[in-house]
Amino acid sequence: MTLRAWREEDIPAVVEMCQDPEIPRWTTVPSPYTEEHARDFVLHGVPGRDRQVQLAIVDAEGGELLGSIGLFSKDEGVGEVGYLVAAPARGRGVATRAVKLMCRWAFEDFALARIQLHTLPGNTASERVAEKAGFTREGVLRQYAVMKGARTDITMFSLLPGEL
């Protein structure tokens, strides 16, 4: 697999990928997910995040869309990584490899002191990805985030330079 910039021709595949009910269950992806949502995401990234890099996770040989990964920064020296993987690509290590690639690049090119990763409590698949990528579970931050209009707990993970 490889990471690359989003292309307009990815929009139909993004729409299809985001029809999986597991994606809006664990992320901020809206449901129902429309072509307009995909177009905004591919062309502009995640709304409300000024400093962000959003990349497609694709099969290196056939170019099939496997998922999405993004990195953004809210605080100086601190990045946050988020990802999702299309249902047919799950269980193959795609997310773990993508997270490692993104984090290695972020530490090298942006000299970050820390990269954070949030999961919703109960999202064991995403927690396994974080741990396999070298992240340390720090704990549950109560009522930390707003998702779909409601406050929710998140589990915080972190990765420091040299821990990859």
Image (tube, rainbow, N blue to C red):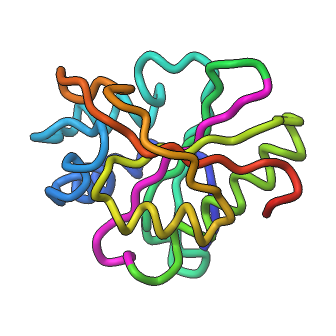
* Residue at (29% x, 36% y) in the render: 28
The foreground one among 101 and 113 is 113
- Asked which quadrant contains residue 71, the reply is top right
Relative placement, left or right, of 76 versus 74 is right
* Residue at (24% x, 24% y) in the render: 151
Relative placement, left or right, of 133 versus 12 is right
Report if residue 83 lies within the magenta region: yes
Q: How many marks?
A: 0
* Residue at (62% x, 59% y) in the render: 99
Relative placement, left or right, of 56 versus 24 is right
Residue 6 in view of the camera: no
| Magenta region | 77-90
> In the image, residue 121 lies at what x, y percent?
31, 51
- Asked which quadrant contains residue 13, the reply is bottom left
Q: Eyeballing the image, is 1 above or below 81?
A: below
Q: Eyeballing the image, is 51 above or below 26?
A: above
* Residue at (43% x, 67% y) in the render: 66
> In the image, residue 64 lies at what x, y percent?
44, 71
